[in-house]
């Protein structure tokens, strides 16, 4: 507790001394046993403080806070809520009083938690660790959320708190914290939506979300990739496919060959590799299932038009549903956009298997001539 002081000592400033008589009369009113009088007294003292709050010394500031606090906590909560709202944006408000209000019930604490510049990041972290989810949600509205505070809000907050944090564009969220949010979002479409909507989410995190989110969110992710430029986009697509030079390639080939030898390499298995985010197994499995080499399979999957994929799948009897799943997956270079994929599916349904097989035979005689594969699609349209 701050030591008691004489009002004349506390308000020795010449300007403040002019108001000393009024202040003393207000303090005298505190002895009146009337709720209405005490409410009015608190309002007038608050007015008195706010007029020149920047001029008060630390001792004077404490003196005001002690008076306002004693009055406010002797009255009903509506009075405290009014006081919290009036002091919430004032950077000179008494620290002890602001701390007390910030830890009050949420109807009182909310404006202070959202706006008070008196509360430090360490204060807010302490509140985050010990207060209700409603208190944490109020904190997410602040304009000055640091990376450390974001980390605490994610660790202690429920899904609603995390979504509100993501929607605060000014909040600083480190990559590690964003990855923690992404891992947690598997069971929350609202959280996934907030991640995709947020600016500056690392591309790798968005890429990892591709297999979890709805078609609409997948389209938004691909639209964000479109903003990074062709060269970077190719790098992202390449990372989705895996590298043929990677040491895991030979292991994947042996793994897939075991399924081939057992007659167990199926479309369902390919789609399981997509869902499990196993790009190398998918690439090799796709090559084996469609009877092309892995290098060619990689070129087919990287074709952004989807034409090559259409012909290879049709020639090998891949069902339309499986074709659509592959085309919409991050294993493919085709933009996951209904406006592009659905017309491609319609073309796939009209594409004749014999035309696709003829194109494949020509393709094998002129290895690598992917441009020739567009003809059967044109002829079937």
Image (cartoon, rainbow, N blue to C red):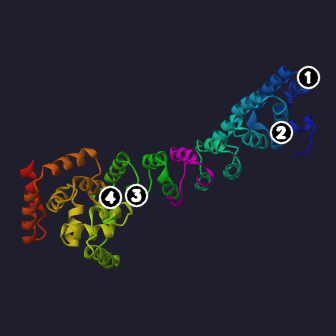
Measured along the vertical axis of the image, is residue 269 above or below residue 112?
below
- State yes or no: residue 157 in magenta: yes
Residue 310 relative to residue 332: left or right: left
Magenta segment boundaries in residue numbering: 154-179
Measured along the vertical axis of the image, is residue 266 above or below residue 169?
below
Residue 359 relative to residue 272: left or right: left
Residue placed at 41% from the left, 60% from the top?
204
Q: Give residue 203's mark.
A: 3
| Callout 4–callout 1 Cβ contact below 8 Å | no
Residue 5 relative to residue 206: left or right: right
Disc 3 element = helix
x, y percentage for residue 53? 75, 35
Q: Which residue does the numbered mark 4 point to in the structure image?
A: 330
Q: Give residue 139's mark.
A: none
Disc 4 element = loop
Q: Which residue does the numbered mark 2 point to in the structure image?
A: 60
Q: Which residue does the numbered mark 1 point to in the structure image?
A: 33
């Amino acid at each position: 507790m701050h030591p008691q002081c004489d009002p004349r000592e506390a308000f020795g400033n010449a300007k403040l001394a002019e108001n000393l008589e009024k202040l003393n009369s207000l303090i005298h009113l505190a002895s009146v046993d009337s709720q209405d009088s005490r409410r009015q007294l608190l309002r007038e003292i608050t007015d008195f403080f706010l007029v020149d709050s920047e001029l008060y010394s630390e001792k004077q500031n404490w003196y005001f806070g002690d008076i306002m606090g004693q009055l406010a906590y002797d009255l009903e909560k509506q009075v405290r809520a009014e006081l919290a709202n009036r002091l919430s944006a004032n950077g000179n408000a008494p620290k002890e009083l602001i701390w007390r209000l910030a830890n009050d019930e949420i109807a009182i604490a909310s404006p202070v938690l959202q706006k008070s510049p008196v509360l430090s990041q360490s204060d807010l972290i302490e509140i985050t660790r010990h207060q209700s989810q409603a208190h944490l949600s109020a904190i997410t509205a602040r304009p000055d959320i640091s990376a450390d505070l974001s980390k605490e809000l994610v660790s202690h907050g429920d899904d609603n708190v995390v979504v509100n944090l993501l929607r605060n564009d000014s909040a600083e969220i480190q990559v590690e914290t964003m990855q923690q949010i992404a891992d947690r979002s598997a069971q929350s479409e609202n959280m996934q939506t907030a991640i995709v909507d947020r600016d500056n989410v690392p591309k790798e995190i968005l890429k990892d979300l591709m297999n979890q989110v709805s078609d609409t969110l997948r389209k938004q992710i691909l639209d964000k990739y479109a903003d990074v430029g062709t060269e970077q986009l190719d790098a992202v697509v390449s990372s989705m496919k895996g590298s043929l030079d990677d040491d895991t390639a030979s292991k994947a080939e042996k793994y897939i060959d075991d399924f081939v030898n057992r007659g167990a390499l199926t479309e369902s298995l390919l789609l399981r590799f997509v869902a499990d985010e196993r790009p190398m197994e998918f690439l090799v499995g796709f090559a084996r299932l469609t009877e092309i080499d892995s290098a060619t399979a990689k070129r087919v999957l990287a074709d952004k038009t989807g034409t090559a994929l259409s012909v290879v799948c049709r020639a090998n009897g891949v069902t339309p549903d499986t074709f659509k799943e592959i085309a919409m997956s991050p294993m493919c270079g085709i933009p996951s956009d209904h406006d592009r994929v659905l017309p491609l599916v319609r073309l796939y349904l009209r594409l004749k298997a014999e035309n696709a097989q003829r194109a494949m035979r020509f393709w094998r005689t002129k290895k690598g001539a992917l441009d020739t594969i567009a003809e059967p699609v044109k002829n079937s349209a």
